[in-house]
Image (cartoon, rainbow, N blue to C red):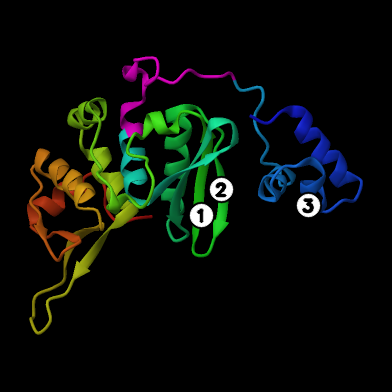
Amino acid sequence: MRSPEEVGRILRLAAEGMNRSEIARAVGIPRPTVSMWLRGDVPDFDRPKQSCPVCAGQVDRLPGHQYVYLLGLYLGDGALSKHPRGVYRLRISCADAYPRLIEECEAAIGAVLDSKVGRVKAIGCVQVSAYSKHWPCMFPQHGPGMKHTRKIELAQWQQALVDKDPRPLIRGLIHSDGCRVLNRAAGTKYPPYPRYHFTNTSADIRRIFTDACDAIGVQWRHNNATNISIARRRSVAILDSFIGPKQ
């Protein structure tokens, strides 16, 4: 973990007129980290250290609703990257078009590990991220390569949380890799009707999604090799009761 002294030195060098590249070379800290600190996004050294509920065998300490929602976001648009000293960075990519989704993602990350959450702007999206040594504990699905190239299954304790209430998982998956659209049947006089789509190249993640739908009585069908469609009026109404259009 970085120290207050390192942050202080970077701020002093910036005040002396050095640019970010020069500071990064002088202190041996990556330029993106230097840039982040100079923007004011510095580690909260006063934050008390929290033990990992999974490592401690106290999964019941996890905020179940926020964790299961974050699990859905991670399975869809999330990634873990390893950094020095065994620290991992969780990144969830959220489209710029949905500011409320970005805020909810931030809140879920902060609730799960009481981590300092930051945003990094990218083309068309924002990467909501936080650092911790315990993200692999939270998401044992992490591994080398793309998710669709390896086995993805929920750990027993994760499945137990999902079984209590599958709705946050479905919501997180729809918020990451799904959408609600108005379907217009070509050549008919019938008005458009709403339907949901979930698209993911991992068969395992699609199965996790459809199992959760089955658990709450939502009927689905395969639209194509990677897309799940939900169009029956009753099933759409169930999803509308806790998801609705992205915002």
Residue at the bottom extreme?
187
User: Which residue is under mark 2?
Assistant: 119
The first of marks 2 and 1 along the sequence is 2
Residue at the right extreme?
16
- Of discs 3 and 1, which sits in the foreground? 3
Labels 3 and 2 touching (C-beta < 8 A) = no
150 in the magenta segment: no
User: Which residue is under mark 3?
Assistant: 20
Q: Position of residue 151 (x, y in %)?
A: 24, 44
Which quadrant of the structure image shows residue 137? top left
Nearer to me, 100 or 214: 214
Q: Position of residue 35 (x, y in %)?
A: 71, 49
**Marker disc for residue 190:** none
Query: Main SS type for the magenta part?
Result: loop
Q: Position of residue 133 (x, y in %)?
A: 50, 29
**Marker disc for residue 126:** 1
- Which residue type does callout 3 highlight? Arg
The correct choice, above or below, for 202 with respect to 7 in the image is: below
Image quadrant containing the C terminus: bottom left
The correct choice, above or below, for 113 with respect to 12 in the image is: above
The correct choice, above or below, for 212 with respect to 94 in the image is: above
The first of marks 3 and 1 along the sequence is 3
- Which residue type does callout 1 highlight? Val
Labels 2 and 1 touching (C-beta < 8 A) = yes
Which quadrant of the structure image shows residue 194? bottom left
Question: Tag 1's secondary structure?
Answer: strand
Q: Residues within 10 Å of mark 2 (few under 14, many from 20)?
A: some
Q: CA distance from mark 3 to mark 1?
A: 22 Å
Q: CA distance from mark 3 to mark 2?
A: 19 Å
Q: Which residues are magenta?
A: 48-67
